[in-house]
Amino acid sequence: MEVMPHFLATQKEINKLCIYYADQWDIPPVGTNDCHYVNEDDAKTQEVLLAMQTKAKWNDKDRFRFPITGLHLRSKQEMNDSFIRQDVLSRKEIDEAIEATIEIAEKCKDFSIKKQSIYLPNVPGLEKENPDEFIYNYALKRLKELGIKSFNFLFLSVDHNNEEFIELEGNKKRVFFNYNLIKFLDDLKGDCYA
């Protein structure tokens, strides 16, 4: 039964319920933490990303934000201290929950998923196009039409003056461009099929 040390009234009630069923079914509680960023000091960065993702203004009092802190990758000591401050689990239950988590982590530590190639379909109507060249040329054409002199993309950087293609972090891979071509297809629909 999963218990979390978050300071939410609902989480406290859920923890009580989980401890009740853990006792009823004779299974140990497992201490976990809702983790949205690695380091504790990444909380503000996460908040900025949430505002950007939801297209909200920073000063908007109604924008989505997490109502709690501590959504980072907590250490064993931080988990222990948070459970104590939450004041729901007994000392014995806290120890059991943390030990069960460590036991699970030990069982999983040698597990890995074999990296596999990603295969994306060709874009309908553009099967004969080289995805790298198509998206580069299309982006360059559209940006010139918009009068933009220099620009950066997630996957490429272009110097308008000499139209030089510069790879960023060696990321010029066919599958990457195909992904972006598929992703942007709805936005480019009219021009892509012209």
Image (cartoon, helix red, strand yellow):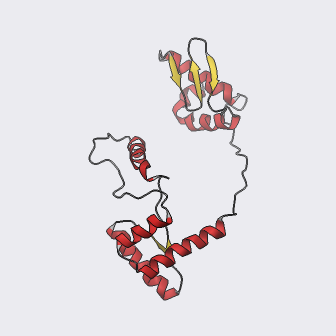
Total number of numbered labels? Answer: 0
Residue 4: % across, % down: 44, 69
- Image quadrant where residue 161 sits: top right
- Image quadrant where residue 192 sits: top right
The reply to whether residue 88 is in sight is yes
> Is 118 situated left or right of 24 in this image?
right
Front residue of this view, candidates 175 and 93: 93
Looking at this view, name the residue that lies furthest to the front. 77
Q: Image point 35% across, 66% down: which residue?
A: 7
> Is 49 situated left or right of 129 in this image?
left
Front residue of this view, candidates 36 and 83: 83
Note whether 90 is above or below 151 in the view shown.
below
Looking at this view, name the residue that lies furthest to the top. 161
- Image quadrant where residue 177 sits: top right
Q: Image point 38% across, 69% down: which residue?
A: 11
Note whether 50 is above or below 180 in the view shown.
below
Which quadrant: the C terminus?
top right
Residue 27: % across, % down: 54, 83
Note whether 13 is above or below 140 in the view shown.
below
Residue 148: % across, % down: 48, 17
Q: Image point 67% across, 28% down: which residue?
A: 132
The reply to whether residue 1 is in sight is no
Note whether 101 is above or below 153 in the view shown.
below
Front residue of this view, candidates 70 and 22: 70
